[in-house]
Image (cartoon, coloured by chain):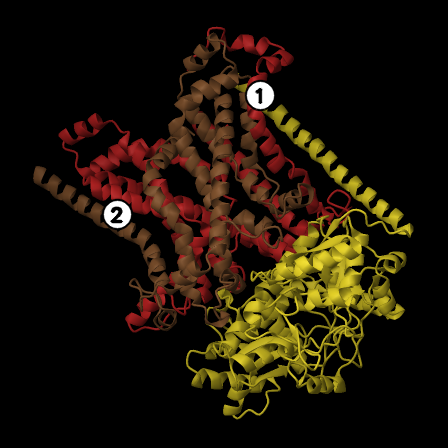
Chain colours: A yellow, B red, C brown
Amino acid sequence: MKKLVKKLLAVILTGAMLLSFVACGSETEDTSTNLSTNSSTTAQTTENSDIDTSEHVTVKFVVLGNRPTNGRLEAMLEKLNAVLTEKVNAELDLQYVEWADWQTQYNLLLASGDDSIDLITTATDWLDAWPNVKKGSFMPLSEDMLKTYAPQTYASVTAEEWEKCSYDGEIYLIPENHYTQYTNHGIIYRGDWAKEANLAAINNFTDLGKYFQYVKDNKENVIPWDVSGTAANGNALASGYIQSNTDNILIEGIPIGLSTLFYGTSKDDAYTVTSPYMVGTTFEEFALMMKEWADAGYWREDVLNYDGDTRELLKAGASGAEQHHTQTYVTDDRPNMDIKLPGSEAQFYSFSEPSKNLVKTSITHGSLAVGANSKHAQRALMVYDLLRNDEECYRYINYGIEGSDYIINDAGELDRPDGWDQSIDALESNFWCGRNDDLELVNARYYKGSADMYSNYNTYAIDYPYGKFVFDTTNVSTQIAAMADVCASYIPRIAFGKVDDPKAMVAEFREKLKAAGYEEVLNEVQTQLNASK
Amino acid sequence: MKKSKNGQKQVIKKSHWKKITDSKTLLLMCLPAIAFFIVFFYCPLPGAYIAFTNFNYKAGIFKSEFVGFDNFKFLLNSGSLWLLTRNTILYNLAFIILGNILQITIAILLNEIKNKAFRKVSQTVMFLPYFISAVLVGLLAFNILNYEFGFLTTLTKFFGKNPISVYQTPKVWPVIIVLAQLWQQTGYGSIVYFAAICGIDAEMIEAAQVDGANILAKIRYIILPSLKPTIIILFLFAIGGIMKGNFGLFYNLVGSSNATLWPYTDIVETYVYRTLMNNFNFPNASAVGLYQSFFGFVVVMVSNWIVRKIDKDYALF
Amino acid sequence: MKIKNDNITILVHTIAYILIGLFALACLLPFLLMISASFSNETMINQTGIGLIPKGFTTSAYALIFKVPKMIIGSYVVTITMTVFGTAFGLFIIAMTGYCLQRKDFPFRNVISFFIYFTTLFSAGLAPTYLWITKYLHLKGSYLSVFLQLLMTPWLIVLMKNFAKSVPFEITESGKIDGAGDFKIFTALILPMLKPALATIGLFLALGYWNEWYNSMLYLSSSSSIKYYPLQYYLYRIITQAAALKNSLAGSNVNPGTIPTQSLKMATAVLATGPIILLYPFVQKYFISGITVGAVKG
């Protein structure tokens, strides 16, 4: 009896496995055939120049940020959607990828191949645009399609610019090519405290350390830099130090997990690949300095387990610094700190300053892609064309509702209504992939010194030298995976000084990276970079 | 065992089709559960094939390029395979062994407490931690251990000593994690043993006491031996899961980005999660998952085989 | 002889009282700290640390939450709805399956039992499951992804099977003689007899739903369709993400830089945990019977 049962079990077990294979296998096939029919219909209608907008559709747009809960976004969308419905019979729905674990959430969202996603905010530098192009997350955009459904946008991008958005001869990204901004990273700190500390302007890490020490010694209940020790922040700090202290130029689009390790040697020798993490003494010096900073208590002892809103803490006077970029300083931190902490004279130390090593913000810093499985690709492009080029739509998506979200002052500049507080009342629509200088209003609240900052940057900034280089990871994907694990385990600890012996730690880190296949990846990058010249 | 008069032999003789039609209602009644397990457990199984591919989102799992065991290589290259296996197994062994010792001790002591109110209240309190989520366990631990304002810091300051930075001291974490697990599970686990002790024939204990056996002898010669079957069964259950980790506990205690602690706190689950989250690397994450599943499967089979050799009655199948 | 015996007994009893008492206190301590911290003044926490007695007693954290309770109430509604429906639905299926699987006249019982048990032996792992649920079932951003996955576990079915075994087979037979079908027998005759089992297993299910955060983290985060998260995941976000903490107070006009971070986290934790802790002394006995049946006969 027992034997029989056993046999039966064995048979059923294999049967069940097979069954599930068959059942699921067929379902998967279904989905994929669906997919291919989808794309073929897309292709067909594209050839059709008649635009059919009889069906009302909702266009889902992935943006980065925390969905606001102040109700202002919904109010704006209601008005915007009325306009969009009238013009192209479509409405917009924003899907947020939240800042917590954003790199993860963003890539997971794309990995899921969700066919309800139509428009996607992406970037070649801070979001993994190229790896996702290669993984098939985005839909190739034919010139016909762009001409037909996004004609104004198509006309405003030059052929050379399109080329920077293409891979294997197909266009995947729509660049934010007509918007002036600098997104070079640095440290935002308090000018008043720096003055008290007899530091005229902080322009290197050593002075920054002195500033932190002054804050530590003299400001009660203030943490010099109340930062969260996340991997993203650790990587940003490490690459900031490298930018400040070397001539190396970061090569975009080779993410090693959350880190970026590969650089061109300098602007004069851009095509020799190196990694300051592996070569030279910079990274070691960095490790030693950060260990000193950690021991001196410039950030929390439990930094690696801490999550705080550093920007808000800085604005509230509880943190002495924040790490972010020029654009944030100009549009948010400085103007708002002038209101909330009058006399704080917030300043910005650009990581590029000591080394004069700076690459201009690329046109693909904010770019738009269409979801690979989007069902409404054409309508989505039409909506995008309006958001980017139609004044009414542009103001809704970027500024909100006139009167409650913004006002236009006598000088014709954008201002905010009385009592409006960015920390509470921000619209947070985060349309960062189609802003347009032609329609952009001068913001009366933005920091007026920005022009000086820009002209200073312009004296030494260079164009990104690797515009057409897209790294193909196929040959080294296992090595990259192994290296990613090493980076995740070491870089945040080194960056926030949570190590006993920094030198030994750096040596160990380098050894592990080598064991994981660093040399092979380096050679692969070099080979492909040479080929892209 | 009571058998119906027709006996089972006749049932076996029936043709398969007859069996199905005869029991179609019962089959239908099982259908929701079967469907559930097919959809959520069996259907993802073929997806494990992803571990052998160079996964492309658009092509999907089965149309991605086949790369053989390439993805498994990184397990060895990164040098973490041994570490993960070791950590997972050692933590589980500690949970099983220390957990059972503590549970049995508590159950025996509880049995000796004659004040009913005290027993009831203490049992209720010990059960409390079982009811809370892993998220809250993580928060409660952080309240005690963190350097800035934790209870431990309050205490050390009170005694005039320097606070300890627990979250930067990897070596103490095995102790903390084991303590947290014991804290959460002991009240729950001891109930089984307590029930087993209550089930011991009272006459047997009385007879022993008349014979002059003292309380220690009672525990040693009557209570402990009578717990043996329960211990063995629970141990077997536990061994089957020796390669499975309690993700919630580890993840919430350690935090998502504290790499300092990983060498001491990483188990397969947390590693898989991170591979997915840091690298977005589906093939590699499922390679680790597959390794874990196979390893775990072998462990269950082997331990079951051994148990069968010793005593058939205790075998799982 | 007798005196010595008594001495040992007294000693053992004393040890029993002390050890059990200490362990019970240890179980209670973290909760007391949490409650104390939720009533503490934020600056006091930061300066002197958390203590057993609230430092600078204040109810400001609770006042803040109750000023804009929309988010936490929304989470409560989600969690309670899921718990109620998930428990009822799951319980019915589990009871039905458990009953069938112990029927000796059901020729497929071993086969189906193993089919279910096998899932505990071998599973696909996180990555394939994630892809399956998001890419093929399209459940990302749907409460169903959480609701469905928690409906049942193999262990609960086995437990139910063991409970159902204790119902005499004669009852099923008597139903058959009366001409009732199997489903009718189950709903009319068996189900009422399984009440204690239903209570026990229902509690396990309910606890699973109430404490859910993991599936929410995987499948609900970053979805525009989800406005309110299940309670424990809401708590997780409040604890680990400064932005979530800030968002929870939207509309309160509090300056984000001055939020009493720690006490607010604790107060949220207290509110998210409170109900289940208040409820559990009343349901404890069902758990005890469940664990006993499950473990001894399992």
Q: Residue type at mark 2: give it.
A: Ile
Q: Residues within 10 Å of mark 1 (few under 14, many from 20)?
A: many
- The part of the image, by quadrant, that contains residue B62 is top right
Asked whether C195 or A108 is in front, the reply is C195
Q: Position of residue B245 (x, y in %)?
A: 50, 47
- The part of the image, by quadrant, that contains residue A486 is bottom right
Residue matched to label 2:
C20
Residue C30, placed above or below residue C191: below
Q: Residues within 10 Å of mark 2 (few under 14, many from 20)?
A: many
Mark 2 vs mark 1: give the one in front: 1
Q: Residue type at mark 1: give it.
A: Leu
Q: Position of residue A13 (x, y in %)?
A: 61, 28
Secondary structure state at the residue bearing disc 2: helix
Read off the chain for label 1.
B
- The residue sitting at 44% across, 56% down in the picture is B138
Res. C276 in view:
yes
Asked whether A285 or A194 is in front, the reply is A194
- The residue sitting at 62% across, 63% down in the picture is A65
Q: Position of residue B259 (x, y in %)?
A: 54, 63
Please tell me the numbered disc located at residue B27.
Answer: 1
Asked whether B273 or A426 is in front, the reply is A426
